[in-house]
Image (spheres, rainbow, N blue to C red):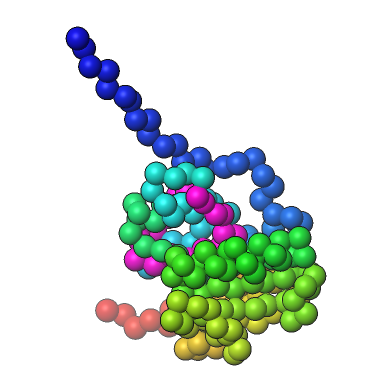
Amino acid sequence: MTAIVPQVSTPIYPSADGEPVAETFVHLYAMLVTLEVLRQYLAGQQATVLSNQFLYYAQGFPKLRVAPDVMVIFDVEPGGRDNYKIWQEGQTPAVIFEMTSAGTQEQDQSFKKTLYAQLEVEEYWLFDPKGDWIPEKLKGYRLQREEYTAITDGISQRLSLRLVVEDTLIGFYRLDTGEKLLIPEELAVSLRQEQQRVAQLEAELARYRQQFGDLLPEA
């Protein structure tokens, strides 16, 4: 008699659920700008920044997942993923941002806050770009003794950045230099200005050469 061995199916971990990425354009823009600014800031480091991708936190249980708006994970291979499985990567996100609203307020303050604390996410930031329920628009929490305590100075210790509300975006400033991390539009303007300065210097150098000859000494 041949024994029948039950087949155990391998869990499938989807990368999308067909739901909208963000509630409004304002929330989407804040999410994408935060993603790009932090991605540029951490370029060259063993870290990755992911946006609106499933975070799976229990192996074998694909329904146990959440999709943070922006999450920063250190000590992992840089680059994108279709989804993020904690047991495969070996690291929990260090910092999570949720672009919150009146419609997501309850989940952001209860389920997600409790879950992120249990997963030992070091910092949890809520940004309400429309000011629907957070008058100051930005609230941060830092994990201490397995519970979140309010961040009152706007400082992300894990990122070494100071966070400032700038209309419907978060402004990020380096703690070491005070320099602002430019958003994509500001980077484009800065690049054009730099190109103009280089062109002006090259034109000035050409005028000097025309008037005085080659400024470099002969070998």
Q: Is residue 80 magenta?
A: yes
Q: Residue at x 67, y 44 (%)?
A: 19
Residue situated in front as seen by the camera: 175 or 217: 175
Q: Which residues are magenta?
A: 64-84
Q: Is residue 1 visible?
A: yes
Question: Where is 216 relative to 115, above or below?
Answer: below
Q: What quarter of the picture does the N terminus occupy? A: top left
Q: Main secondary structure of the magenta part?
A: loop
Horizontal and vertical percent for residue 192? 63, 68
The residue lying furthest to the front in this view is 1
Horizontal and vertical percent for residue 105? 71, 66
Q: Quadrant of residue 191?
A: bottom right
Horizontal and vertical percent for residue 98? 62, 65
Q: What quarter of the picture does the C terminus occupy? A: bottom left
Residue 116 relative to residue 47: left or right: right
Q: Residue at x 80, y 70 (%)?
A: 132
Q: Is residue 87 magenta?
A: no
Q: Residue at x 59, y 90 (%)?
A: 153
The residue lying furthest to the left in this view is 1
Q: Residue at x 57, y 59 (%)?
A: 68
Q: How many marks?
A: 0
Horizontal and vertical percent for residue 196? 62, 72
Question: Where is 143 relative to 44, above or below?
Answer: below
Q: Is residue 179 visible?
A: no
Residue 156 relative to residue 131: left or right: left
